Image (cartoon, rainbow, N blue to C red):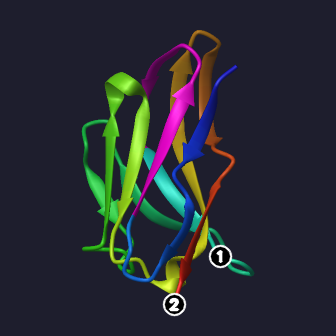
Amino acid sequence: QVELVESGGGLVQAGGSLRLSCSASGRIYSIGDMAWYRQGTGLQRELVASISRDDYTTYADSVKGRFTISRDNAKNTMYLQMNSLKPEDTAVYYCNADRLTSQYGPFFGLWGQGTQVTVSS
């Protein structure tokens, strides 16, 4: 079947960097808009950054200038480069695709399983 798989999370000190990846598995024909969300303990899931298929990007104010979202359509993969990390960036990070077409048909609102990012002070 089709799924989104995140990787690259981990433990890092404040001021450090991490690069998250989100890859779509299966025989994928195309992916529409994609985004990174995060959810801290006891908090609601929030949008971190989004990217359209033609690379239009948006960012939450809290990460502007520190995070960069990108994608490689040929590899069906999205990235999130996170620099100058702060303890308040600690959360589970999820990738999302608003629509995806594959050999199994179309999928809408697809989510990954999440990857933990922990920033120590």
Examine the image and state in which quarter residue 68 appears: bottom left
Q: Is residue 68 visible?
A: yes
Q: Nearer the viewer, mark 1 or mark 2?
A: 2
User: Residue at 68% across / 79% down in the picture?
Assistant: 43
Dominant SS in magenta: strand
What residue sits right under mark 2 in the picture? 121
Vertical comparison of 45 with 97: above or below: below
Residue type of the residue flagged with mark 2: Ser
x then y, percent, for residue 120: 55, 83
Magenta segment range? 18-33
Percent x, y of residue 56: 25, 49
Q: What residue lies at 41% left-to-right and 42% top-to-bottom? A: 78
Mark number displayed over residue 71: none
Neighbor class of circle 2 (other Cα within 10 Å; few <14, some 14-19, many 20+) is few
Q: Mark 1 sits on what residue? A: 40
Residue 120, magenta (yes or no): no
Q: Nearer the viewer, residue 111 or 90?
A: 90
Q: Earlier in the sequence, mark 1 or mark 2?
A: 1
Foreground of the two, 99 or 16: 16
Q: Secondary structure at mark 1?
A: loop
- How far is mark 1 from mark 2, CA to CA? 16 Å
Q: Residue furthest right?
A: 42
Q: Residue at x 72, y 78 (%)?
A: 41
Res. 32 in view: no
Q: Residue furthest bottom?
A: 121
Asked if residue 23 is among those painted magenta in the image, a careful observer would answer yes
